[in-house]
Image: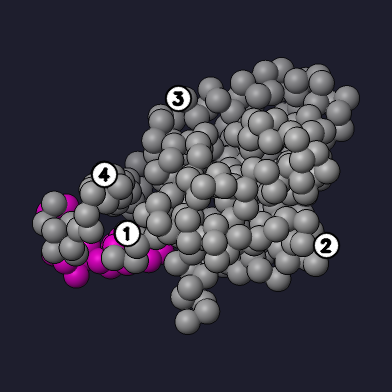
Amino acid sequence: MNVQTIENGYHYNVMRRAIELIDQSSETLTLDDLARKMDMSPAHFQRLFSAWVGVSPKRFQQYLTLGHAKALLKNRFTTLETALATGLSGSGRLHDLFLRWEAMSPGDYARDGKGLTISWGWFESPFGPALMMGTDKGICGIGFAAETSVEHAMEDLTSRWPDADFVEDPMRLRPWALAAFGSEGALDEAPLYLIGAPFQIKVWEALLSIPSGHVTTYSEIAKAIGNPRAVRAVGTAVGRNPISWLIPCHRALRKSGGLGGYHWGLPVKRAMLAYESARLDDAVA
């Protein structure tokens, strides 16, 4: 393990501790408070936090509140039917990459991945350690371990395609990982390969139409796919989304403005919404 890897691991753990403190606090923490708890100078902590999270500690705290989720639902709610009809997704993605995708046939899906070779590898992301999986056609899985464990994330994704052959090959996936998490000099495209039942794929396709920095509700997704009564089934399909972040299930909220659940932990969902909202506001300002 080289010095850079050790340093990145140390910095990630510092940022994780800081985000946990912010998430658990009932009041806004000052830069001095956070820096002192991390045993850093305020200036150093501010630079490190902004580099890893994408925004300052103060801005991040503003975007983590339930009030912010409700404001998103009020001011940045996108009716999916309109988005699908007008191409809003393409023009509003902002920092998102253009995503080329295709879906596995229902017959192949029914075979539980038999005959499919899936490469996997671990990568750093703005939301903690990310497990990426992919076939020769594109990314088929992204999971996060910040709120669970690397073992749980691996077991979770591999269990979705139990008869596939899994091969550790991070170098093959690295260009897609760099593109997925917006690294400088990355590819312009992160292709996706959706492996799911037909109903699930319809739900995931609808999620891809939600612009970055905006949100929708489970009931709106149900309407957009032509099955307005299937809200509970939609919620289940959202929860089974295997390509987190790129298929933005984190943008689905309850009608009340509540965050609802999130497969990889609510702090990760809050961080994703905060990250997108802050970048959208910076671009508009």
Alpha carbons under labels 4 and 3: distance apart: 25 Å
Q: Earlier in the sequence, mark 2 or mark 1?
A: 1
Q: Amino acid at mark 2?
A: Ala
Q: Which mark is residue 85?
A: 2
Q: Considering depth in this image, is 23 or 118 the residue closer to the camera?
A: 23
Q: Which residue bears the numbered disc 1?
A: 61
| Left or right of residue 106, residue 203 in this image | left
| Magenta stretch prevailing secondary structure | helix
- Residue at 39% across / 43% down in the picture? 267
Q: Amino acid at mark 4?
A: Gln
| Left or right of residue 58, residue 96 in this image | right
Residue 160, compared with residue 267, is above or below; it is above
Q: Earlier in the sequence, mark 1 or mark 4?
A: 4
Please tell me how crowded label 1 is: few (under 14), some (14-19), or many (20+) other residues with Cα within 10 Å.
some
| Left or right of residue 203, residue 107 in this image | right
Q: Quadrant of residue 210?
A: bottom right
Q: Which mark is residue 183?
A: none
Whether residues under marks 2 and 1 lie with C-beta atoms below 8 angstroms apart, the answer is no
Q: Considering depth in this image, is 31 or 190 the residue closer to the camera?
A: 31
Q: From which residue to which does the magenta span run?
A: 38-57
Q: Which mark is residue 151?
A: 3
